[in-house]
Image (cartoon, rainbow, N blue to C red):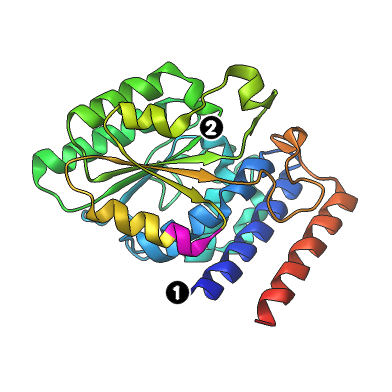
Amino acid sequence: MNKLELQKTANEVRKGIITAVHSAKSGHPGGSLSAADIFTYLYFEEMNIDPKNPDKEDRDRFVLSKGHVAPGLYATLAHRGFFPVEDLKTLRHVGSYLQGHPDKKHIPGVDMSSGSLGQGISTAVGMALSAKLSNDSYRTYTLLGDGEIQEGQVWEAAMFAGARKLDNLVVIVDNNGLQIDGAIEDVCSPYPIDKKFEAFNFNVINVDAHDFEQLDAAFKAAKECKGMPTAIIAKSVKGKGVSFMENQASWHGSAPNDEQYETAMADLERIGEALCQK
């Protein structure tokens, strides 16, 4: 896909996020929207995956460490063809396979059931180590929240990954600056994030999370880097694309009402129309 196609796809993913969370009347739109471009790049450009064969042995692995932004992952998987887009409207409904956090047993394309913050990266490190021990070619990617990296387990995993030189691992931090209680620097500052990962022997790349050219360069550089895992620190906007949600911590875990849903979808329609003019 070229840059414009990725932008259009990411905008459709954002519509899916808003539709799902509105239908559920609960969920986490803010961080899902901030990560939508990252999800889109991974699933439509970067990773070796096959929606027709979700469990193929040589597939690249992805772990959503910040599992509460499942609406973002689900919308991406749906648009990539893993399951019907229409099913996004069943998010968090009784009996739906699309529950509030990813479920490996019931959702095609999910490699780990996640949601307990801090644990996803540890599993991703284990997957990367397994590939090394078995001489398998697959790569492992994991997405963390910048509030999530306040968890100590994250740094134990990072220490291990750096010590074992897991160059088949890419850790992405969605650095939108906000968590449920407010600004991350006010709650328990993880800054400087890049210097911390460097201290654990990571190849660190800082990018604009909403610039596909920067994402493309970063993931290509990660593949070329040997002997070190890579951490991509992606500076993002919480609630990206929806005017009243952008940079508002209150939209970390709140669902839009009917009127807000209409406003949000109108915002995204305008973005889509502008992209079609390019």
Magenta stretch, residue numbers: 211-215
Chief SS of the magenta region? helix
Element class at badge 1: loop
* Residue 108 appears anywhere in the view: yes
Q: Earlier along the polypeptide chain: callout 2 or callout 1?
A: 1
Q: How many angstroms separate mark 2 from mark 1 (CA)?
A: 28 Å
Three-letter code for the amino acid on which mark 2 is drawn: Asp
Residue 116 in view, yes or no: no
The numbered dot on residue 82 is: none
Q: Which residue is mark 1?
A: 1
Question: Which residue is situated farthest in the right direction here?
Answer: 259
Residue 98 at x, y = what percent? Answer: 56, 46
Left or right: 271 with respect to 173? right
Query: What is the residue that sits farthest to the bottom in this orientation?
Result: 277
Residue at coordinates 49% horizontally, 54% vertically from top-left?
39
As helix, strand or loop, the secondary structure at mark 2 comes to: loop
